[in-house]
Image (cartoon, helix red, strand yellow):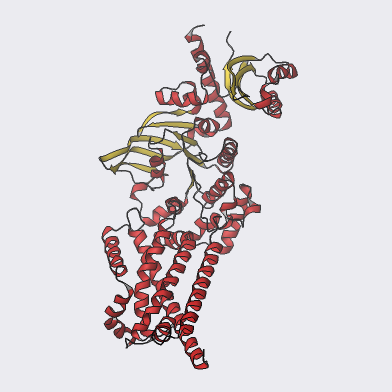
Amino acid sequence: MSPALIDLFLDALTETVIMVAVSGAIAFVAGIPLAVVLVTTAPGGVFQNRAVNRLLGAVINGFRSLPFIILLVALIPFTRLIVGTSIGTAAAVVPLSISAIPFFARMAEVSLREVDRGLVEAAQAMGANRWQIIGQVLIPEAMPGIVAGFTITLVALIGASAMAGAVGAGGLGDLAIRYGYQRFETEVMAAVIVVLIAIVCAVQTGGDLLARRLNKRL
Amino acid sequence: MTRTAYSGSLVGYGQSAVAADADLRPTDEVAPVLVRFDGVGKRFDGPAGPIAALEDVGFQIRRGEIFGIIGRSGAGKSTLIRCVNRLERPSSGKVVVDGQDVGALSDRNLAGLRQRIGMIFQHFNLLSSKTVFENVALPLRFAGRSRKDIEETVRPLLDLVGLTDKRDVYPAKLSGGQKQRVGIARALVHRPDILLCDEATSALDPETTLSILQLLKDINRRLGLTIILITHEMTVIREICDRVLVLEAGRVVEEGAVSEVFARPQAAVTQRFLKAIVPDLPPFIAERIALEPDRGCDMLLRVRFSGESARDPVISELALAFDLTVTLVHGGIDYIQTRPYGNLVISAPYRGQEALSGILDFLRARAVQTEVIGYVPRSH
């Protein structure tokens, strides 16, 4: 690869990392509260509320049923409203986050729901209020599973970010399409594939390691 | 031998038991009522309409008692014990704890009441993500206590349950008995008046069960804690309870002092429960078994052998070593494949607690599982 191409490559790598990191962080921060609402408003939950539970479940399912490439285009007006433009890396973060939030919320929901009901009951018997049960029992106990779910979310985001080139967001996927595919530069294609594999492996290994360290059940 | 003769001796036993009780706990008669159930009913919505878990349950528990509730699974025990700290709300009737109507408490007052009622569980319900220390400290953190305060409260409790060296260990590394000790320490951090035990020993092996029950008894004596426990095992009732209530299909079928209920079980369920711990004994013996020794009585021991010890002449050695007349009351030796398993009930004159522990040590040293079933007044 020529030095110019290497520069392009590094820029693309940076763009991918930024897109994934920022939308991942947003998904984490927004997804956990949604998961908590899903679990606690479900029947038998500490904030049991059938209407809220059903409505939120339906909204999440709605967003999850859209393929990312469609979401990317459909959200253009919304993206423009938030970042002022619908083109570029920052603009891609909006649809990436919107697609990752419900995905991660479902992942976290499963982990939260697997927390033994006996623990909630024990906390109630100790005189804990509902917020304490969420903050000091449900979330800490579900954390290993939440981290594992977040790892999967990040990997999915890396995949989705390859499509963000469609709105001029750059990134490794965009580079591979423009140079590797459209200009027949096989080297670039190969390099992108290798780097993507390396990133995914690193994210997965790191996530597994963290989840294992947090899991005191073994 | 006539039936009147036995009942005569039973009355004698009953009186002595009351006297012994009074010696140990002179305040028992006047201890104030701490928990009162008043016509408590609870219905759940089942697929085929409402199901009654409890119906018209009424009883009283006095301060300082160890009160046992026994029933088969599905009898409503769990629902009943959860009404005390309002983990369940009765559909009818009321529960009064220390003069407060539990059903009428505001959220804040309920939290206050729950701090005065510790609870331990069959499956311990410890947080896997927190160390032993953090688990015990959790109720104090909920109550917003300072770090220093927590440290000072938790340390002596870990000492009390014998887990000081495990303070920074996670529950996964503990045995069942140790986990329940953590549960007990956690239940005691607010210095409660009442301890609720929800099948607290049902997941433990017999030996660990005994050590946990000993700990509970010890806490009851030392801290004056009122203990309410539910169980499906009559041995638990026999081991530590002062009074027992028998629950069947959501209704109270029998209630009374443990010694009374064991001596004269009224309800069919109670008799079945008793049978489980004194199985197959001829009725003329089973009916006369007392839990405490009386002057000039025989003690009934269950001895279980397995493997090689079943071939040794343990019983005759015992008779020789202690100069005892040992009578075989019931039992036999089974062979499972080619290994002999013995299960005998023997009786011998009771010569005081010291002699009894000598005999138990002798048998246990020979790898024989031994258990005192009870005492039978000698027939004349």
Establish if B166 lies above or below B233: below
Q: Nearer the viewer, residue B92 or B87?
A: B87
Considering every residue shown, the one lying at the far bottom of the view is A4
Specify whether residue B143 is in view: no
Considering every residue shown, the one lying at the far top of the view is B1
Q: How many labels does the image show?
A: 0
Specify whether residue B370 is in view: yes
Establish if B303 lies above or below B142: above
Q: Position of residue A85 (x, y in %)?
A: 32, 88
Q: Which of B231 and A17 is in front in this view?
A: A17
Could you tell me which quadrant the C terminus of chain A lies in? bottom right
Q: Which of B98 and A88 is in front in this view?
A: A88
Quarter-of-image position of residue B297:
top right
Q: Residue at the location (54% across, 62% down)?
A: A212
Q: Nearer the viewer, residue B261 or B284?
A: B284
Quarter-of-image position of residue A154:
bottom left
Answer left or right for B218 relative to B366. left
Q: Position of residue A182 (x, y in %)?
A: 38, 86
Q: Residue at the location (50% across, 69% down)?
A: A204
